[in-house]
């Protein structure tokens, strides 16, 4: 394995960890939240503004980039980092989840998945080998194995079939990964909501030569308690010396609960998608700027925020932008949301370092609850 990728745990508090992932393109402070830049852009954000929120790493996606503009084209143009003007670490999702959720007329077999593009209906085949080739062409720093993700709830038989296929694909992805200085490849635990399947998957992947391990197939329709139960089942069987990534999660409360159980990395479209639809995440809970109660509210989203979008604009102005469908409203709320998520991660890291994570989570959740209760119509 490459000697230029490493993970160090600097502090623990119970099962929670504070650490750093080192890559030649930059250090990733953990627990880390990765803004989603699916198609080589974090929607409604300039790259430098994403960085200013505190992000150390972004996520890109094989499925979307292979369809448009194409991995080979991005490689000819200098790779994904130069293409999107983000010189810092990038993780690429293998495309497996998007094939299952977005593609038309897909056909799955041992070799991979044949599907029609949701954009123009063109036919494509994505296999573990092709997914790893695309990630190599993109030049991402952390690359993910190709897997099959099933939606929950599903039968244990279906979860077992997909888990075993994903393990076989993990072996093939690992072999197809092109080792280069600073590049890493992660395996993905599957198994639906079955504890025995999750344990079997975790143990098998722990025995493979991956740089890190992800937990996939959660935040796909199951209640939070199921997700947390699966984490408590899975994480003890993953190597403590490697980073643990919970894919596609989630709400601020999902994140603090998962950090407490030992997760190091997260990604989710929630803060950016919510921002484009008038919803702000703040230390005082969610604020729906579509609500008429904010039409004459001169207070900002968060007067103490270091983010200009959250600190310098009134809720009345943000409400107006949202109601008028102005692009600036989407930009400001997206920035405010990403800044809040990064502030939350910084708070979690500090709390772990100080040995007061339990108190921090209790205080944070109480503040969310009090803020949202105060915002409800009387």
Image (cartoon, helix red, strand yellow):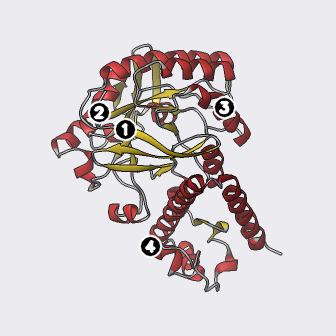
Between the residue at mark 3 and the residue at mark 4, the CA separation in whole angstroms equals: 40 Å
Residue 38: image location, x then y, percent: 40, 47
Label located before the other in sequence (2 or 3) = 2
Label located before the other in sequence (4 or 2) = 2
Give the label on residue 6, or none: 1
- Local packing at callout 3 (Cα closer than 10 Å; few below 14, some 14-19, many 20+) is many
User: What element does badge 2 sit on?
Assistant: loop
Q: Nearer the observer, disc 3 or disc 4?
A: 3
Give the label on residue 3, or none: 2
- Local packing at callout 2 (Cα closer than 10 Å; few below 14, some 14-19, many 20+) is few
Q: Residue at x 39, y 35 (%)?
A: 117
User: What element does badge 1 sit on?
Assistant: strand
Residue 261: image location, x then y, percent: 64, 40
Between the residue at mark 3 and the residue at mark 1, the CA separation in whole angstroms equals: 26 Å
- Compared with residue 250, is residue 291 higher up or lower down, i.e. above or below? below
- Local packing at callout 4 (Cα closer than 10 Å; few below 14, some 14-19, many 20+) is some
Please report contact status of discs 4 and 2: CB closer than 8 Å, yes or no: no
Q: Nearer the observer, disc 3 or disc 1?
A: 1
Please report contact status of discs 1 and 2: CB closer than 8 Å, yes or no: yes
């Amino acid at each position: 394995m490459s000697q230029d990728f490493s993970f160090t745990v600097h502090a623990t508090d119970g099962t929670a960890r504070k650490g750093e992932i080192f890559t030649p393109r930059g250090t990733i402070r953990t627990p880390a939240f990765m803004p989603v830049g699916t198609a080589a852009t974090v929607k409604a954000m300039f790259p430098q503004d994403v960085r200013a929120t505190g992000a150390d790493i972004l996520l890109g996606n094989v499925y979307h980039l292979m369809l448009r503009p194409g991995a080979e084209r991005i490689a000819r143009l200098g790779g994904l980092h130069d293409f999107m003007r983000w010189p810092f670490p990038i993780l690429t999702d293998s495309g497996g989840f998007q094939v299952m959720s977005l593609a038309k007329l897909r056909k799955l077999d041992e070799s991979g998945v044949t599907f029609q593009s949701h954009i123009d209906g063109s036919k494509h085949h994505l296999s573990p080998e092709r997914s790893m080739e695309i990630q190599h062409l993109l030049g991402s720093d952390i690359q993910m194995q190709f897997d099959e993700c099933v939606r929950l709830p599903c039968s244990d038989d279906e979860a077992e079939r997909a888990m075993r296929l994903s393990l076989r694909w993990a072996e093939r992805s690992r072999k197809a990964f092109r080792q280069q200085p600073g590049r890493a490849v992660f395996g993905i635990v599957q198994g639906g909501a079955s504890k025995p399947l999750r344990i079997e998957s975790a143990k098998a992947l722990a025995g493979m030569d991956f740089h890190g391990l992800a937990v996939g197939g959660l935040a796909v329709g199951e209640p939070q308690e199921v997700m947390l139960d699966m984490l408590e089942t899975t994480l003890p069987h993953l190597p403590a010396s490697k980073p643990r990534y919970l894919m596609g999660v989630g709400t601020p409360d999902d994140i603090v609960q998962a950090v407490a159980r030992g997760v190091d990395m997260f990604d989710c479209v929630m803060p950016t998608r919510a921002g484009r639809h008038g919803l702000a995440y703040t230390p005082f809970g969610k604020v729906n700027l579509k609500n008429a109660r904010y039409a004459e509210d001169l207070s900002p989203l968060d007067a103490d925020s270091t983010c200009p979008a959250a600190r310098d604009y009134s809720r009345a102005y943000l409400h107006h932008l949202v109601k008028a469908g102005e692009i600036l409203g989407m930009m400001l709320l997206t920035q405010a949301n990403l800044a809040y998520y990064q502030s939350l991660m910084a708070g979690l890291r500090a709390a772990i370092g100080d040995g007061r994570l339990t108190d921090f989570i209790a205080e944070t959740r109480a503040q969310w609850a009090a803020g949202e209760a105060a915002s409800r119509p009387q």
